[in-house]
Amino acid sequence: MASLKKIARRSFLVGSAAIVGGVAFGTFKYHQPAPNPLQPGAGKAILNPFVFVDQSGVTLIAPRAEMGQGVRTSWAALIAEELDVDPAAVTVLHGPAAKAYYNSAMMAEALPGRGYDASDLKHSLGQIVGNFSKFLDLQVTGGSSSMKDGFTRMRLAGASARETLKEAAAQQLGVARALLETKDGVVLAPGGVTLAYSELAVAAADVEAQEAELRPAAQWKYIGKPVARIDMVEKITGTATFGLDTRIEGMKFAAIRQNPHYGAAMRSFDASAAKSMAGVEEILDLGDAVAVVGTNTWLAQQAVDAIEVDWAPANYPETTEAIFAEIAAAFDDSPNSTLRDDGDVDDLPEGAELLEVEYRLPYLAHATMEPMNATALYTGDSLEIWAPNQGPTVVQKAAADLSGLEAEAITVNTTYLGGGFGRRIEVDYTNLAVQIALQLRGIPVQLTWSREEDMRHDYFRPGAIARYRAAVKDGKALMVHGKIAAQSTTQEGAGRMLGLPMSGPDKGHVDAAFNQPLAIPNFRVEGYLAKPMIPVGFWRSVAASFNGFFSDTIIDEMAHRAGRDPLEFRLELARAEWEPAAQVLERVRDMSSWSGETPAGVGRGVALAYSFGTPVAQVIEVADRDGDIAITKAWIAADLGLAIDPRNIEAQLFGGLAYGLSAACFGEITFADGMVEQENFPDYDALRMPSMPRVEVAVLENQKHMGGAGEPGTPPAAPALANAIFDLTGDRARELPLNKRFSFV
Amino acid sequence: MSKTLRINGKTHEVDLPDDVPLLWVLRDEIGLTGTKFGCGVAACGACTVQVNGEAMRSCQLSLGDVEGDVTTIEGLGTPDNLAKIQQAWVAHQVAQCGYCQSGQIMQAASLLAENPSPSDEDIDDAMQGNLCRCGTYPRIRAAIHSAAKMMQEA
């Protein structure tokens, strides 16, 4: 372990630098620091990109997309923990697109292994392998990774800043640094002398940056406690700037129509009617899309809708049935992966009861509340982009490819995101805004997609088919053999993001299937990849969004076949594999007073899923309301290992549940004539206030490693609900959405 | 096609076709961006404003049909002077992505003006047109109950 520690020390370069009127602190995690993204001013250098102290106070650059998960607040709390400032007093900015802001934790997830069984060594290795993402320039927000990524880096930046400010004070006062203390943004010296950080900022820039040991957990003031979100007041007063709220002097408004057949061309269009419509200034041919630029978004939308377009047809199967036939055909190939292969799934002992079932889940849209949009200004030798995005360096690289400009000439401003859920890690919407701007040199243009365009031009959660064979005997789980077929989000989505062809066993494709913490003696999971057809991408919890349903529903079916209580059945399997998984089950059992019995007209279901490092158990209660189903209650227990902000994690978990229930009840994207059939919320609805259950959440800290919060709440939602409906009705749902079979209140 | 609008107590002259929805007058003409575009078909509630105190979907209200005083989220309270309902939203830490919250708050404010102490069922009825993809509903419900109490105590 000594050598690993040495590497870790070397890889954390801590430094400081002068800025105008102050000092900047930060950490670089690799021994060749990435180019500094911040422009030096007035002949002064800036080295480090995370913490600034100047006359106006402390500013944190939190280069992660704030899409509702609270990353700005939690990263501010991590800095504040070491820097001794009130998190509410910290100004938080997103900062520019830069390699220095790469995400190490997301790459670490790509390591082989089930996750929950990772040793300390493997977690350390994950940290080091994480450095490779720098080479891929990935400044991205996703994979429920921000807290794992920022937990050490942000505290180190805060600690370095604190000790350096103290050193500046020590030199100024002529006392030893060890005699100084810090509190609420002030250095305290013996004799009641105080010096505010803002007063020390300029002097600190000339002091050699100090390293400091991180404080032990026992001393934490903010970590582990609820911190008021720093974005709350803006967001409830209409003053937060989302992408669509970008307003640049002289800005025009654009609307667009793209070929509803993905990847196919636009043969021709007739804009004669549109040209003379009110507010229309430009009609632009974008190759496979047509745009109208005008004085008002709505007027531009009316005009673009009035354009007659001849779209080239789709070059993939044109109907939902034909697309699913292709997915099923993937089972005829050899498996892409067999990442779990315990025991023998072929030979069943005498007396075993065999279940053979198929599950089908649909393609899904993200449907963020804020439709896709971006604003761009091209000057001829530079490009500026304002966009609610999850990957600024990805946006920048794509814009460089389109414009022929160097990446350095392209500024990406990341606004608040009106929902992300993985949709905004793509760059199709920024590329279209850039294409428009390139034709309108010197004029800033805001492109807004209609909801219909947003719904039909998504990178969808892939439709998936699972075939399971399972066996029980004498009340015990004996065997599970799952085969999962779908388009590959990893190969198609990550390949698109990195610009690299992807191959090899696709671990993401079978996440929350092969790595479920269940001790089943004969357990095999195979992944099958369907050919690329519909554009697919990262949808909150990615493949765990379908695998969570497959791998838990089969367990529920086995429990019933074995004549066992479904919660006790899971508990027995989890306990023998990984104690934290058993503990989340026990917690929901206790919270919900689970007895295995429900009154007439009430049903209960339980589900367990492990994803993004976090085991989550949910119990859902449903009630019969004159033949309609009401989702009345939900209990969630999740083990985060370390809960940085329990109140915020609670919100992420019930939010993840709501996102999963929305899809389970109503979510389905279907195809006809090569086009998406759904257009807007009336035919792609989501959970609303009356259908949201009363929720109780428990955040546990039993496991050794830090788990994610944003995604793990989603995978267990659909199976818990379907299992509850089975308990109520005796009707087993093997396809979603449930509103095809059941009517909801 | 010039029209005078009264928004948050201020008068605005706008020169746009009568059929432009109020939403796009507010956002693209007047620069009041707190009111959000979500669906354009009155199915999500993100664009909710009040006209003479009544919650309305501004994406379906044509400029030519606007009569009376319009209140947007910017007119309800400001960061330095939050309305009681906004204080309740802070107390319950409601917002996640926050995009739908302007509409949620305008709808809830209208409910509380009509019904100072709504039951859970009243809240379900009044709020069902306001979509939140982050699933903040439990805290919206709690915040409405808190706001009702605060307003009655005031």
Image: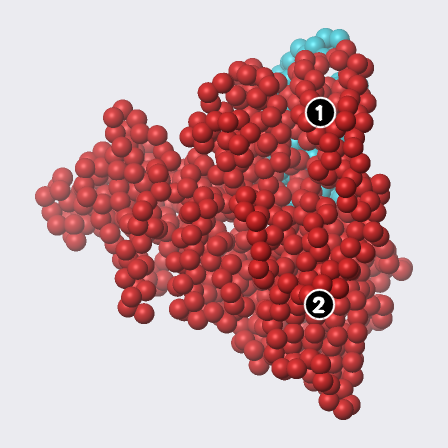
**What whole-number distance in Å separates the C-alpha atoms at marks 2 and 1?**
42 Å
- Which residue is under mark 2? A483
Scheme of image coloration: by chain
- The mark found on residue A390 in the picture is none
**Chain label for disc 1:** A
Q: Residue at x 69, y 76 (%)?
A: A480
> Chain A appears what colour?
red
Which of the two residues, A458 or A575, is positioned nearer the viewer here? A458
Q: Residue furthest left?
A: A174
> Is A92 positioned to the left or the right of B63 in the image?
left
User: How far across and down, in percent of the image, does residue A26 sit?
Assistant: 32, 44
> Is A635 positioned to the left or the right of A98 in the image?
right
Q: Residue at x 50, y 72 (%)?
A: A117
Q: Are marks 2 and 1 on the same chain?
A: yes
- Which residue is under mark 1? A290
The quadrant the N terminus of chain A occupies is bottom left
